[in-house]
Image (tube, grey):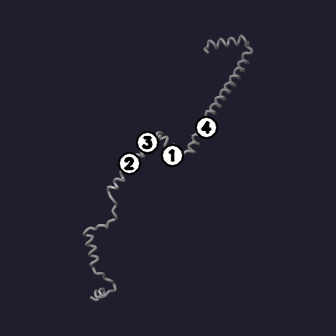
Amino acid sequence: MSWWEISIVGLMMILVLGPKELPHAMRTIARYMRKARRLASEFQGHMDDLVREADLDEVRKTVTSIKNQDVGSVIGQAVDPTGDLTREIDTTLADAREQVKEIKLEAGPTPTAAPARTSPAASKVEASKTDAPKVEPNSDASAAVGKA
């Protein structure tokens, strides 16, 4: 409504109701407008609650379905819905296992533990230890050394 239309409605109210009844009529109209706004606000609040409940119901259904399912399968479906990635990984693993088997067959049986090799210097030290006579503290040789 434009200002011109509002002024026409105001002039008609003054002519129909008169100047004495106009304030009382304006209060009554304002009261009905407040009630209508309250009802609209309440209705909007109820509609918002319904939407929230519907969203919560959807969330509850999702949580319940996840609780009843294997989490790994849910994640697997989210990551690889077609299963192409899983098949590719399985074939790659199978190929790798086959190659490892072939390498093991070509290498032959695994050797047993070989004796440790020593350097020539270490073998000479070992030989000198075995060639030297052992002297015991109570032997006759130690007594002879003590007398001399």
Q: Position of residue 11 (x, y in %)?
A: 68, 11
Q: Is residue 84 left or right of residue 22?
A: left
Find residue 24 and report its image quarter: top right
The residue under label 2 is which amino acid type?
Asp
Residue at figure coordinates x 25%, y 72% from the top left: 124
Q: Name which of mark 4 and mark 2 comes first in the sequence.
A: 4
Q: Residues within 10 Å of mark 1 (few under 14, many from 20)?
A: few
Which SS class for mark 2?
helix
The residue under label 4 is which amino acid type?
Asp
Q: Which mark is residue 85?
A: 3
Marks 3 and 2, how far apart at CA: 15 Å
Find residue 144 and report its image quarter: bottom left
Query: Considering the image in quadrants, where does the C terminus appear?
Result: bottom left
Q: Which mark is residue 72?
A: 1
Find residue 60 and report its image quarter: top right
Marks 1 and 4, how far apart at CA: 24 Å
Which SS class for mark 4?
helix
Which SS class for mark 1?
helix
Tag count in the figure? Answer: 4
In this view, 99 is above or below 126 = above
Q: Name which of mark 1 and mark 4 comes first in the sequence.
A: 4
Residue at figure coordinates x 51%, y 46% from the top left: 72
Front disc: 1 or 4: 1
In this view, 2 is above or below 56 = above
Q: Position of residue 110 (x, y in %)?
A: 34, 60
> Would you name the residue on which mark 4 appears?
57
Q: Name which of mark 2 and mark 1 comes first in the sequence.
A: 1
Front disc: 2 or 1: 2
Residue contact between numbered discs 4 and 3, judged by CB atoms under 8 Å:
no
Marks 4 and 2, how far apart at CA: 47 Å
> Would you name the residue on which mark 2 appears?
95
